[in-house]
């Protein structure tokens, strides 16, 4: 692939604005993994009262929480210190199993979620009826077919049984496949955030308060999440 193609293809795939941001991120990361430009869409989607897939499609799947110390954690690609930090903030990991084999998982945080890619804490204002989901992962051999729908169907039942009405998540603006998959689940955008990471320095722009923030050292920005007016209507 020529240099020109590498520049043009992101513009075609993501659009002019997002394509330029993607090119900047790739250029920064090529210099150092500590230089990045993260563009997140913060979304909210409803927890349905009905199944997301016909029972006959997902009858082979079972679900259970994966607790701290479980040997299955070694199969997950996240760094060990990241997984430990998730348990320290009391996040839950729900595993999906087929014929007793782990095929995927998703994490949930209640009350607040401390992001591990950037120095941001997402605070849930309606903490009694919402969660923040993150790191939805399907092992490569299960990404075709009904893997995604099956995992979300189990997650939907798990959350509904705990009185959760909706779940927030953040998706990279550059992850087209994930955004399309979530579109089918009825999600609504709450805000967009951009994080420029330059080693320990981070600059944030967001479409919700505080709109702009500079992080030096270990200080984190807090973003309070609530369904906006449009989302509230669509999720009701």
Image (tube, rainbow, N blue to C red):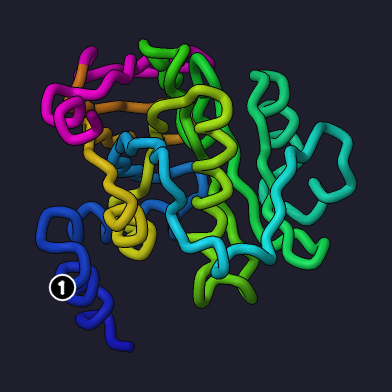
Say above or below: 36 vs 26. Answer: above
Q: Is residue 94 visible?
A: yes
Give whichever of 159, 87 is nearer the camera: 159
Q: Is residue 26 visible?
A: no
34 left or right of 201? right
How far across and down, in percent of the image, does residue 18 sit? Answer: 18, 55
**Residue range of the region highlighted in magenta in the rendering:** 209-236
The C terminus appears in which quarter of the rendering? Answer: top left
The residue positioned 46% from the left and 32% from the top of the image is 118
Say above or below: 151 vs 121. Answer: below
User: Looking at the rendering, which quadrant does residue 64 occupy?
Assistant: top right
How far across and down, in percent of the image, does residue 111 sit? Answer: 50, 14
50 left or right of 173? right
Q: Secondary structure at mark 1?
A: helix
The N terminus appears in which quarter of the rendering? Answer: bottom left
User: Looking at the rendering, which quadrant does residue 27 occupy?
Assistant: bottom left
Residue placed under numbered mark 1 in the picture = 12
Give whichever of 17, 227 is nearer the camera: 227
Q: Is residue 227 magenta?
A: yes
How far across and down, in percent of the image, does residue 61 sit? Answer: 67, 60
Q: Is residue 110 magenta?
A: no
The residue positioned 73% from the left and 58% from the top of the image is 97
Give whichever of 20, 122 is nearer the camera: 122
Say above or below: 78 vs 116. Answer: below
């Amino acid at each position: 692939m020529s240099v020109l193609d590498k520049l043009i293809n992101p513009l075609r795939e993501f659009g002019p604005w997002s394509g330029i941001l993607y090119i900047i991120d790739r250029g920064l990361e090529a210099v150092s993994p500590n230089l990045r430009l993260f563009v997140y869409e913060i979304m909210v989607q409803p927890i349905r009262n009905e199944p997301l897939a016909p029972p006959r499609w997902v009858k082979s799947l079972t679900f259970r929480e994966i607790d701290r110390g479980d040997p299955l954690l070694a199969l997950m690609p996240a760094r060990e210190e990241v997984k430990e930090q998730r348990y320290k903030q009391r996040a839950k990991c729900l595993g999906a199993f087929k014929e007793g084999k782990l095929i995927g998982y998703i994490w949930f945080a209640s009350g607040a979620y401390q992001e591990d890619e950037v120095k941001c804490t997402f605070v849930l204002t309606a903490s009694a009826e919402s969660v923040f989901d993150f790191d939805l992962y399907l092992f490569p051999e299960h990404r075709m077919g009904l893997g995604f729908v099956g995992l979300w169907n189990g997650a939907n039942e798990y959350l509904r049984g705990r009185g959760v009405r909706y779940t927030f998540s953040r998706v990279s603006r550059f992850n087209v496949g994930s955004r399309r998959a979530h579109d089918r689940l009825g999600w609504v955008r709450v805000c967009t955030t951009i994080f420029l990471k330059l080693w320990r320095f981070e600059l944030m722009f967001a479409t919700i308060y505080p709109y702009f923030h500079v992080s030096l050292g270990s200080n984190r920005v807090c973003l309070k999440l609530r369904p906006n007016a449009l989302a509230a209507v669509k999720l009701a």
